[in-house]
Image (cartoon, helix red, strand yellow):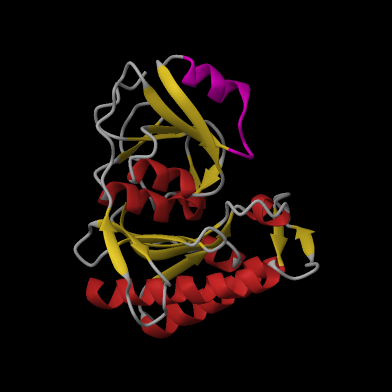
Amino acid sequence: MDFDALVPTMRKLALLAGDRIMEIYDSADFEMRVKSDDSPVTAADEAADEIISEGLRAAFPDVTLITEEQADSHALSAKTFLIVDPLDGTKEFIQRRGDFTVNIAYVEDGVPLRGIVYAPAKGRLFYTDASGQSVEETGALHKDVVGDLVPMAVSKPDNAALMVVASKSHRDQATDDYIGKYMVRDMTSAGSSLKFCLVATGEADIYPRLGRTMEWDTAAGDAVLRGAGGTVVRFDDHTPLAYGKGGWDNPFFIAYAPGVELK
């Protein structure tokens, strides 16, 4: 893959999709329906998916594309693929909480090598550059002009005073019980893939997820965290979370800054 071509393409498509999402978000009302898996979907999910999918297929026609909103793509299998969640955090979108993101990632041999996470309502843009270093872009976020880039790096955690980030919409007793095994200084909640980014920027030390997720939910955030020096492992055996699994389901996992003493 030509990462010098891939990264600008992902960046521009994420920004374009974000603009369309915000047009719908700021409208007086928008349609919502429930998919066969009982998850919600809106016109914003579908519009963003169309923008991103058309752009990626035009730029990289030979690379398999997996996207949440296109069920026919879920039957595909490949070692190398692009994977998209055009609007992660649909519940946050519907409730107008702002914690939703656009997610695009490139996976090779089970590893998310490049990814972009854009939170349009918050104006925060995180991605891996062509070299694999994760950066947060600040400024006006123009489509064709890259702004100031701040290199991202995970924290140096203090295991006697950890900062934990957990899901805003999917918090449960099992998660609380697991967090209770650590010495926690403070805890915050966030929606969508922003949780990975908070670990990647050093704003949190650990993000445990004891709940169902799909690969398109996590691949971009995982790539950003890896590019900032972080790690994502399976909850059960602490081996690296891999991608390209049959069915695209993830096991429970832990995203963290190295130095956290996992329980």
Asked if residue 157 lies in the magenta stretch, the reply is no
Query: 13 or 146, which is in the foreground?
Result: 146
| Residue 134: image location, x then y, percent | 28, 56
Query: Residue visible at 35% across and 26% down?
Result: 237
The number of callouts visible is 0
Magenta segment = 168-180
Is residue 161 something one can see in this rendering? yes
Q: Is residue 51 left or right of residue 83?
A: right
Is 153 rendered above or below residue 167? below
Furthest-left residue in view? 131
The image position of residue 165, as x and y in percent, is 47, 34
In this view of the protein, which residue sits in the foreground, 135 or 234? 135
The residue lying at 64 percent from left, 40 percent from top is 169
Looking at the picture, tell me which residue is in the foreground, 101 or 155: 155
Q: Quadrant of residue 86?
A: bottom right
Q: Left or right: 188 with respect to 130?
A: right
Up the image or down, 194 lies above or below 71; here it is above
215 or 259: nearer the viewer: 259
- Viewed as shown, does residue 260 lie left or right of 246? left
Q: Is residue 178 magenta?
A: yes
